[in-house]
Amino acid sequence: MIAVMTPEVGWFDVLVQGVRRPHSQWVGAVEPFSWLELDYETTGRGFSRLVAASVKAVFVSAGAPLEQVSGAYVLSELIQTILPEHASQPAVYARLLQALQALPSVDSYLVVAWFRLQLLSELGFKPSLNSCSLGGEPLTKAAVVGLDTQRGGFVCHTHTSGSDATLPLSPQQAAVLKLLSERPVTDFGKLRLASADRESVHLAVQTLLNYHTERPGRRAAGFFNRYGTPDLGEKRAL
């Protein structure tokens, strides 16, 4: 079985018969993390079976660096964990396509964080990153002290709750979160964050998504969190 996603149908499982045979017709046609043209049929038992497939593009190949492969697995698991099967999500499909295309050139931590924020927005949980989620006042970068995951937004010095739901953030980390929510993922190809900043941004977005969906990531996310990406050097301004 393979999981596929289309803008019209959403994600669903497709049976690929004989794919493990040495001379199977499907060898090279069902590469993971690829863009396919496919044809399938629904059987009498109610499941889908692959009839024809051809690869249009491979976003992350099996020989790609570990951080790219693990990032692609996280994106895939997010779709299957958060979204119901056979639910049309053309906007989410478009964001997933953009994220997979960006993995070879953008820090995987940033790609995954960007996609999680886009997924939150599409599901109706767009974080409040322009004003304090407690007091409502407009925020400057320097005024942000943390992210309240329960209220879904930044909090300032005046109204910080000091609860376990508030994750502390530096002004730099808050600025990166705001940019990730507003700009295309391709804008971050030259952005390099120190390990501490990268991990804080990643944790903030992951915790926010887990709270609103009540569905934490599975094995790939745990692997990604443990091994992640190496320190990529000095930070560069966007």
Image (tube, grey):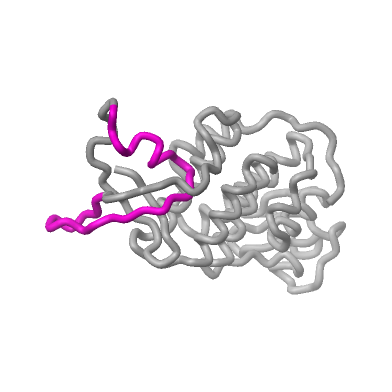
- Residue located 74% across and 72% down the image: 135
Q: Position of residue 163 (x, y in %)?
A: 64, 54
Image height of 125 relative to 237, above or below: below
Q: Is residue 191 left or right of residue 163?
A: right
- The question of residue 119 being in magenta is answered with no
User: Looking at the image, which residue is at 48% across and 37% down?
Assistant: 220
Q: Is residue 46 magenta?
A: yes
- Residue drawn at point x = 78 percent, y = 36 percent: 194
Q: Nearer the viewer, residue 59 or 92?
A: 59
**Magenta highlight range:** 23-49
Depth check, front residue: 207 or 228? 228
Q: Quadrant of the N terminus?
A: top left
Tell which of 36 and 88 is nearer to you: 36
Location of residue 232 (image quadrant):
top right
Residue extending farthest to the top is 22
Give the image location of residue 217, x and y in percent.
47, 45
Vertical placement of residue 48 versus 202, above or below: below
Left or right: 120 as drawn, with respect to 187: left
Q: Position of residue 162 (x, y in %)?
A: 69, 54
Q: Position of residue 4 (x, y in %)?
A: 39, 51
Q: Which residue is drawn at the image coordinates 43% and 39% (left, top)? A: 31
